[in-house]
Each structure stands twice: as structure tokens, then as C-alpha cells.
Image (cartoon, grey):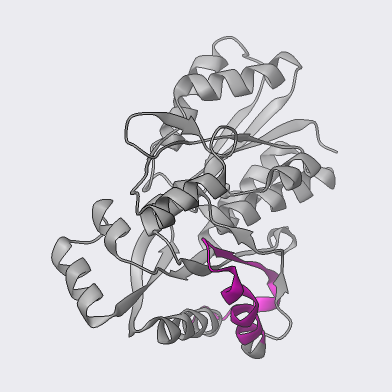
Amino acid sequence: MADFQIFSDGACDIKRDIAKENNIKIIPFYVSLNHTDYYKEIDELSLDTFYNEMIGNNVFPKTSLPSVQDYINAFTEDLEKGKDILCFTITDTLSGSYQSAITAKMMLEETYKDSKIIIINSWHATGSQLLMVLEAARMQKNGIDIEKVAEVCEKMKVDGRIIFVVGTLENLRRGGRIGKIAAVSGSILNLKPVIVLNGGEISVGAIARGRKKAIKKVIDLTVEHFKKENEDYKDYLFTIGATNLFEEIEPFQSNIIEYLPEAKFLNSFQIGATISTHTGKDTLGICFVKRYENYM
């Protein structure tokens, strides 16, 4: 195994046992349910508590990014052991986490002049960031050095996508992603936008009336992506994320497999507080990145 430490901010939504199994260290975001008191996601505020408040009590949470000092504290322990650092952050279009990490890197390089500290702006979040981090860990286990891992991941982030549907437009409105008129109109007409994260930017890939049709649009856009880009879906890893409606995951995946029968799915995951603060309840989506062997 190549001797460097992989980090990611908490936006990758990795389960703690999977992170431990793959020697990945997480730098969490902070979440507030009352806009005053902030707690570290997972470490100090469980997802059960978060969703009970957001869904059960109609709370609109807020998040705060990891500070420069959070990154310094996290990196220093491994730098002191002589390890290099490879860190992934959520796309910088959604958060300042990347800039915090870059600032920490610049400060630490003054002391640890012989160490490599590589920060990757993943251009992604949640499941696609998760897949990228896991691919980095797989490369590390296979003895690939830190520079090559970083080089591959910089290519990988270009090809990855997230395609998802939300249950309500209100969180997107409050986060400034859509206007008030669009949110109200969407609610009245039961319009459901299908959101795409591509190249670090969020866009509307399609609009459907009703959730069932919107989920079908997610599948259609996924299948169309591989045809349009002339890509072989078998070269990719897939995962499905949901905020709370876990009963939708199995039929959703089964429907995708009807069109992409040899797709390799990793375990589904629960979308964390950092992302669901912006997307709201009832979010369901598919995430995919290309396996690292295709870049070697």
C-alpha cells in the first residue's frame, strides 16, 4: 500500500465503518437546526436526529464548512508521522470547503516542506464524491503513488455525474438555487425538476409533473448520457442515494438495470445533512464515476 493518508470532507456521505475499512479520514461539516448552535455532522449530530427535525418538525437546517483550523488539525497528525496527504472536497461551487483546505495546505507547507499535500476539488458531492474517494483508496491499496492517484482523480471528476429528483423546491429556494416564483409555481403544478451535477455545476436536466415521472426522467437521462457521450456504462461504478424514502431504492435500481443490465452498483447510501440541507426531503438520485483502470 502506498504510504499516504486519504482525507475527505463530510460531503462524501461515507459511512464511518466503510471509511475505517478503507483508511479514509473524514473532516465533517457543521450543522445547525436552530441557526445558532452548530454541531459536527455524524460525530455530534446523528442523521436520525437531523431528519427527525427536518422532516418531522419542518425545520430548515443550515450548514457551515470545515474551518482552516479543522483541516490543519486533521492533516498535522499524519504529517507528523511522515505521511503525505491527499484530500477531496465538495465542489467549490457549493461550498468554501476547498478554499479552507487550500489555505491549510499553504500554511502547513511552511513547516512540512518535504511533505506532499494535494487537495482535489472533486467537482462533486455526496455519492459521486464518495465513489471517487473509494476509487482513490482502491488505487492506494494497489500500490499506486499519490501523484498518479491525484492525476487519475482529476480525470475521473470530469466524467462523473449525479442525477436526482427532489421532493420539494423549498430548500433549493432558501439556498438561493431557484427563485421564489419558480418554487411556488412548481409546488402548485406539482412540477419536479430533475437536477444534474456535472463539472461542479448544478443544472436542471428535465422537468416532469409528479414524482413517478420525475424518477423515470432520472433513469432516461442516465441511459441517454452513455449514448450521447459514446461511453460504455460497464466502465463505471454506480450508487444510489436517498434522504429518507429508502423503499424507493430497490425498484429504482431494478428499473435502471433493465436498461443497463451489467451496471456495477455499490451499496446504496443515505444522503447526509450537508447535501440534504439544500435538496430537502424525499431526494433520490443516481451517482456514477468511471473506474480508475480506464485512465491507466
**x and y percent of residue 50 in the render?**
48, 46
**Left or right: 13, with 178 as reference point:** right
Position of residue 130 relative to residue 224, above or below, is above
Total marks in image: 0
Position of residue 163 relative to residue 150, above or below, is below
Q: Residue furthest left?
A: 181
18 or 95, which lies in front? 18
**x and y percent of residue 93 in the render?**
36, 48
**x and y percent of residue 249 in the render?**
61, 73
Quarter of the rendering occupied by the N terminus: top right
Q: Residue at x 74, y 82 (%)?
A: 262
- Assess whether residue 29 is covered by the magenta stretch: no
**x and y percent of residue 26 in the render?**
62, 36
Q: Residue at x 70, y 47 (%)?
A: 136
Q: Residue at x 78, y 50 (%)?
A: 138
Q: Is residue 123 among what the camera can see?
A: no
**Left or right: 22, with 223 as reference point:** right
**Left or right: 190, with 292 as reference point:** left
47 or 177, which lies in front? 47
Q: Is residue 216 among what the camera can see?
A: yes
Magenta residues, start to end: 228-257
Q: Quadrant of residue 205?
A: bottom left
Q: Quadrant of residue 19?
A: top right
Q: Residue furthest front?
A: 57
Q: Quadrant of residue 103?
A: top left
Quarter of the rendering occupied by the C terminus: bottom right
63 or 67, which lies in front? 63
